[in-house]
Image: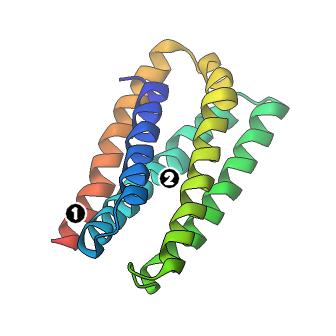
Amino acid sequence: MNAIELLKKQHKEVKTLFRKMHKTEAARERSQLLEQIAIALEGHTTIEEEMFYPAVKDLDTKKAEEMVAEAYEEHHVVKLVLAEVPQVDVEDEQFGAKMTVLSELVEHHADEEEEEMFKTARKIGEDELEDLGARMEARFEEVTGKGRRRAA
C-alpha cells in the first residue's frame, strides 16, 4: 500500500473510533476506545513525523515546507490534549468535552492533509510512495505493537 493510501486508511479508522466514543456513555467502553485512539494516534503521528513529513519536505518547495511545519504543530497540540484526557474520569462531562476537542483537532488535521498535503506528496513518485508506504506500515506495527503489549 502506498504511503498516501495508508495514511488515508488510518485517518478513516481513527475517525470511526471517535464516532464510537461520541455514541457511548459506558465507562468501560469509553476507556477501551480511549486506549485504542491513543495507540492509533501514537503510531500514526510517529510514522508521519519520522517518515512521511521528511519525504514531503524533501520536495523542497515553500508550500511543502509550510504544510509540514503546520502539521508538526497540529500534532503537538493533539499530543497535549491527548496527554490530559487520561487524568479525567471517563464519566465526567469534561471527558466528553476533551474528546470532542481532540476529535475536532484530529479531523481538521486529517482533512487538511488529504485536501492539500497529499496532492503535493504525489510529486514524490509512485514507486517511492509504495516503498515509503511499506516502511511506514512496518514502523506503525512496531510502534502500536509496543502499545498493545503495554496495555496487556
What amino acid is labelled 2 in the image? Answer: Thr
Which is more toward the observer, 5 or 22? 22
Q: How far from the left and from the top, in percent, is residue 125?
A: 56, 15
> Which residue is at a point 58% across and 41% down the rendered structure image?
110
What amino acid is labelled 1 in the image? Answer: Arg
Where 133 falls versus 34 (above or below)?
above
Q: How far from the left and from the top, in percent, is residue 132?
A: 44, 30
> Which residue is at a point 54% across and 79% down the rendered structure image?
94
On residue 148, which mark appears? 1
Q: Which residue is mark 2?
A: 45
Q: How far from the left and from the top, in percent, is residue 90?
A: 39, 78
Mark 1 and 2 residues: CB-CB less than 8 Å, in contact?
A: no
Answer with left or right where residue 56 lies relative to residue 2: right
The image quadrant of residue 38 is bottom left
Which is more toward the observer, 38 or 128? 38
> Which residue is at a point 51% across and 65% down the rendered structure image?
99
Q: Tell me the element at label 1.
A: helix
> Which residue is at a point 64% across and 17% down the rendered structure image?
123
Q: How far from the left and from the top, in percent, is residue 83?
A: 51, 76
Which residue sits furthest right?
Answer: 62
Which is more N-terminal, label 2 or label 1?
A: 2
Instruction: Kindly report the distance in space between the C-alpha atoms of the residues bearing marks 1 and 2.
Output: 16 Å
Where 152 falls versus 132 (above or below)?
below
Answer with left or right where residue 58 lies relative to residue 93: right
The image quadrant of residue 13 is top left
Answer with left or right where residue 143 lies relative to residue 145: right
Q: Tell me the element at label 2.
A: helix
Where 120 falls versus 23 (above or below)?
above
- Are there few (<14), some (14-19), or many (20+) residues within 10 Å of tag 2? many
Which residue sits furthest top?
Answer: 126
Where 38 falls versus 40 (above or below)?
below
Say which quadrant the C terminus sits in: bottom left
